[in-house]
Amino acid sequence: MKKTISIKTKIEAAALLKVAPFRKEIRKTEPHKHNSYFEIIFLREGSGFHTIDHTSFSIKPPTIFFVRKEQVHHWDMTGTPDGFVLLLKKGFVDQSMDSELKSHLSKLSGLSCVHIKETGSIDTLFQLLTIEKEFTVTEGLLKALFAKILIAAKPLTIKTSKTDDIIAVFRELLNQTNNLRNNVAYYAEKLHTTPQNLNAICRKTLDQSAAEVIAVHIISEAKRQLIYTESSVSEIAYSLNFNDTSHFVKYFKRYTGLTPQTFRNT
């Protein structure tokens, strides 16, 4: 194991979007992350397993995988893959004025794997995106693709509101795993609201308290480091802004039922 999780970049620094055929020579990869973009992988052929964080998914095409920038993933394929990979940076979304596109993307970012039945239009949209260069046309194709995937992933669709926007930004802040804080007030201030209001929004929208939403991200990042690095428990606690290792151990056990070291050894 390494002290840190390796980071791979498959898109040029200046590019905001890249869509390309899935490389057929890929079989096994080491655990890694892509911390500058959201990745959508559409496989119409292939077999084996795709592991995202600590969950291993059996590859049963046609299927679509979603990997957020903070997540660790790796492939263990036994059959020749065929499909497409879409890499989307936040900069593209920031440039877009299409609120519906952003709403679709917010919903997709909560998914890990979707098995689909009808692939024709999804396949066509991916193919068109590999050759389209004009921003507004690409924007339209992306919105159509996201809408088709969401239909395949029903029941998911919900109406969007300012509350959804706050949740989306809250999640984006939590996805910045290099500075996670177990502190509701810290995130409320960044969202220009009060801890009480953020808590109320989380309970209404996600059926969780704000502290529980934060905990999901902290525990996920802790598990990544415990699985994929050889950092000590104290080092991991420090990286997650816990001043006291014993507090981190109790926090981790409260949400998982295991101490960090026991989790690492299982």
Image (cartoon, rainbow, N blue to C red):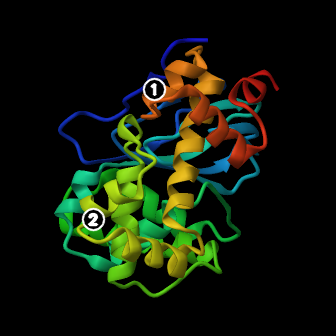
Q: Dot 2: within a 10 Å radius of its alpha carbon, few (fewer than 14), some, or many (20 or more) residues?
A: some
Which residue occupies 66% across, 56% down? 63
Determine which quarter of the picture holds residue 11. top left
Confirm whether residue 140 shows in the render: yes
Circles 1 and 2, Cβ within 8 Å, touching? The answer is no
Checking the image for residue 191, the label placed there is 2
CA distance separating discs 1 and 2: 25 Å
In the rendered image, the residue lying farthest to the right is: 266
- Where is residue 9 drawn, in percent x and y? 37, 29
Helix or strand or loop: what does disc 2 sit on?
loop
Helix or strand or loop: what does disc 1 sit on?
helix
Q: Is residue 155 above or below residue 222?
A: below
Residue corresponding to mark 1: 238
Most foreground residue, 245 or 116:
245
Q: Is residue 174 above or below residue 167?
A: above
- Where is residue 92 drawn, in percent x and y? 24, 56
- Where is residue 115 drawn, in percent x and y? 70, 62
Q: Amino acid at mark 1?
A: Tyr
Task: Please identify, in this view, whether the residue under mark 1 or under mark 2 is nearer the observer.
Answer: 1
